[in-house]
Image (cartoon, helix red, strand yellow):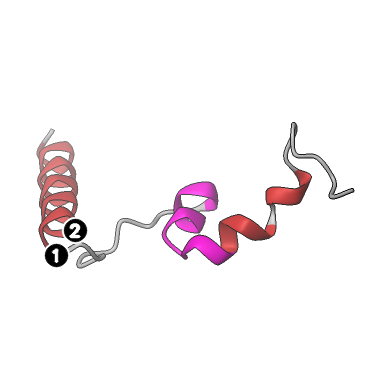
């Protein structure tokens, strides 16, 4: 129970500091799409052409 409380406090502090500083302060160990969203717009635009509903340029 104590470990769960400590984990919740760490997560709350990490997310609060991240929101206040607009950057990652404490590691939240993001993986996959969550980590990719923080890498920037270029990483997201690279896969845009393969998304459903995006037409090829004529």
Q: Are marks 2 and 1 in contact (CB under 8 Å)?
A: yes
Q: Is residue 29 above or below residue 11?
A: below
* Residue 47 is inside the magenta segment: no
- How many numbered marks are there? 2
Q: Is residue 39 above or below residue 10?
A: below
Other residues around mark 2 within 10 Å, as few (<14) / some (14–19) / many (≥20)? some
Report the quarter where the N terminus lies. Answer: top left
Other residues around mark 1 within 10 Å, as few (<14) / some (14–19) / many (≥20)? few
At 75% from the left edge and 50% from the top edge, which residue is drawn?
Answer: 49
Question: Could you tell whether 11 is left or right of 38 in the image?
Answer: left
Question: Could you tell whether 36 is left or right of 47 in the image?
Answer: left
* Residue 34 is inside the magenta segment: yes
Of residues 40 and 54, which is closer to you in this image?
54
Instruction: Provide the residue span drawn in magenta.
Output: 32-42
Q: Which mark is residue 21?
A: 1
Of residues 17 and 3, which is closer to you in this image?
17
Tag 2 secondary structure:
helix
Residue on which the image places disc 2:
18
| Image location of residue 31, percent across then percent down | 49, 53
């Amino acid at each position: 129970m104590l470990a769960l409380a400590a984990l919740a406090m760490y997560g709350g502090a990490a997310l609060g500091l991240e929101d206040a500083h607009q950057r990652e302060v404490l590691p939240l160990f993001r993986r996959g799409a969550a980590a990719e969203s923080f890498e920037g717009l270029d990483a997201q635009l690279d896969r845009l052409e393969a998304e459903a509903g995006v037409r090829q340029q004529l």
